Image (tube, rainbow, N blue to C red):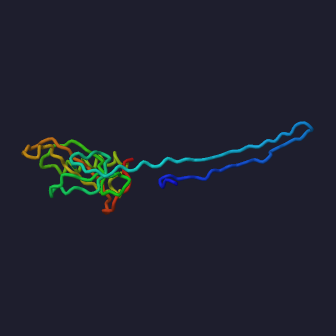
Amino acid sequence: MTHPALTTFPVALVLAACAGHAATSDTMSTTSSATATHTWTAAAAPAPPPQTVKWIDLDVGQCVAQLPHVDLGDVTVTVVDCATPHTAEVYLRAPMWVDTTVPDIANKQCAAGFPKYTGLSLAGSRYTVSYLVDAGQDRTGDVPNAPGTVICLLADANGQPLTGSAHH
């Protein structure tokens, strides 16, 4: 039985027939050679299964099936292998102060981090960026100007699923 994830190649067997032989009254010599070649390939490791994590715990290089609807109360996201179709990829986590300038600061940090992660300029690329902001609060209090984290994500500018990582 052949394993479906393995690729097999036929074995090549080459025989050189009697490359030379000499006969005398008491000896006979025959020269032959045989070469066998076989190539094995290892099965690709299976992709890790999707896992649900809190979006505030997303890390650089992780790919998400869908962006969370934070304004609707989503707390978790599904992280998938980047080789499988996904909506977005985390490319930067950066500290920031949470105040009224959040959009300005987040956009600047995400724009600056994009070429470092992808090796591309954001302008003219096939990507668009978005961000999530973890205010760093305990979620029950109001702490103005609390240190937080901006989580920058890239996605296809036309809304198409991504396959593979954008990391260079």
Residue farthest to the right? 25
Q: Position of residue 166 (x, y in %)?
A: 36, 51
Q: How many marks?
A: 0
Residue farthest to the front? 1
Q: Is residue 34 left or right of residue 8?
A: right
Foreground residue among 93 and 65 = 65
Q: Is residue 151 left or right of residue 147?
A: right
Residue drawn at (34%, 46%) of the image: 117
Q: Position of residue 119 (x, y in %)?
A: 37, 48
Q: Is residue 14 left or right of residue 163?
A: right
Foreground residue among 56 and 127 = 56
Q: Is residue 100 left or right of residue 107?
A: left
Residue drawn at (33%, 55%) of the image: 123
Relative height, residue 50 to residue 146 (above, below): below
Foreground residue among 124 and 51 = 51
Residue drawn at (15%, 58%) of the image: 72
Q: Position of residue 64 (x, y in %)?
A: 29, 53
Q: Position of residue 96 (x, y in %)?
A: 19, 43
